[in-house]
Image (tube, helix red, strand yellow):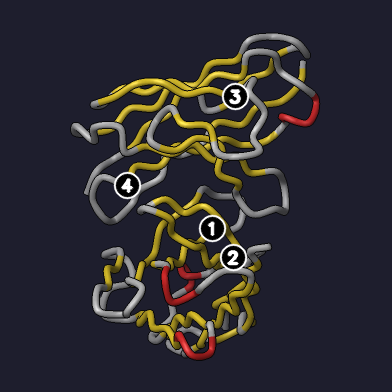
């Protein structure tokens, strides 16, 4: 199975800050990577697919990049409503494993 | 609008069985692969299983293989997860999700399964 790692596991930033999360796959997954946002008590929401494509309706302050084994997720200007846990997920080969998550909160 | 509503969760003893259902609406169910993903209390997401649009292709995570069975009824716009030989470590919120080009794009709100004596 493909293993996914994320860093950091948590971060605290101020409103308006640029926030970056990294995700690494244990083998080449091309661009078959998603990013999800999960708020407490809610289902995950798809933000980014194919590593860099913004899902319809998602604010443009969210972006993703990378290919192969190394990927980056960025919030260009953190907003209070972005407080959540963010997960990467590979869908190159089943099982479609998730990273352990990055919890983002406001400083 | 796409809606996925899970049901069937509850408290079950170790070794017991439970059948989860997911009712889909707002899209042509028979055109899409579907999946189950779970989340243990306070933990991260664990992908469990997927089924192709026709039901001919199925995949399971190793942690549930041989114990869980995914199925669908396209006439009823419904997805199912039969869970047998349940263990404490199967305790989780179970989400069903629609798969669009191998991406889980819509998720239900989840149903809680608790395995405890």
The residue located at (47%, 54%) in the rendering is B104
The residue located at (34%, 21%) in the rendering is A66
- On screen, residue A20 above or below A90: above
The residue located at (24%, 73%) in the rendering is B57
User: Which residue carries the number 4 mark?
Assistant: A91
Q: Are marks 2 and 1 in contact (CB under 8 Å)?
A: yes
Q: Nearer the viewer, mark 1 or mark 3?
A: 3
How far apart are the two marked residues, 1 and 4, measured between alpha carbons?
Answer: 18 Å
> Which type of secondary structure does the marked residue at label 2 adopt?
strand
Q: Position of residue B53 (x, y in %)?
A: 36, 73
Q: Which chain is mark 3 on?
A: A
Dividing the picture into quadrants, the one containing residue A23 is: top left
Q: Are marks 4 and 2 in contact (CB under 8 Å)?
A: no
Q: Which chain is mark 1 on?
A: B
N-terminal of the pair, mark 4 or mark 3, is: 3
The residue located at (67%, 28%) in the rendering is A59
Is there one chain holding both mark 4 and mark 2? no
Q: Assess disc 4: are there few (<14), some (14-19) or many (≥20) residues with their C-alpha within 10 Å of its C-alpha.
A: many
Q: Nearer the viewer, residue A32 or B25?
A: B25
Is there one chain holding both mark 4 and mark 3? yes
Q: Nearer the viewer, mark 1 or mark 4?
A: 4
- On screen, residue B3 above or below B39: below
Q: Which chain is mark 4 on?
A: A
User: Which residue carries the number 3 mark?
Assistant: A62
């Amino acid at each position: 199975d493909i293993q996914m790692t994320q860093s950091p596991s948590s971060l605290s930033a101020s409103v308006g800050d640029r926030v970056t999360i990294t995700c690494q796959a244990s083998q080449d997954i091309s661009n078959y990577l998603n990013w999800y946002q999960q708020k407490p008590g809610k289902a995950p929401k798809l933000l980014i697919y194919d590593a860099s494509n913004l899902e319809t309706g998602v604010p443009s302050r969210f972006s993703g990049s990378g290919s192969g084994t190394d990927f980056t997720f960025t919030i260009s200007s953190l907003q209070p409503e972005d407080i959540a846990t963010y997960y990467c997920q590979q869908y190159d080969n089943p099982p479609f494993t998730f990273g352990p998550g990055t919890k983002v909160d406001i400083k | 609008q796409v809606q996925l509503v899970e049901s069937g969760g509850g408290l079950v003893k170790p070794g017991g069985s439970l059948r989860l259902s997911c009712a889909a609406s707002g899209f042509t169910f028979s055109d899409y692969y579907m999946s189950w993903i779970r989340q243990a209390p306070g933990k991260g997401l664990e992908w469990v299983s997927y089924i192709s649009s026709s039901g001919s292709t199925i995949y399971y995570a190793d942690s549930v293989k041989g114990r869980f069975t995914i199925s669908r009824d396209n006439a009823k716009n419904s997805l199912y997860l039969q869970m047998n030989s349940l263990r404490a470590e199967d305790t989780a919120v179970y989400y069903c999700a629609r798969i669009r080009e191998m991406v889980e794009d819509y998720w239900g709100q989840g149903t809680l399964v608790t395995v405890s004596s």
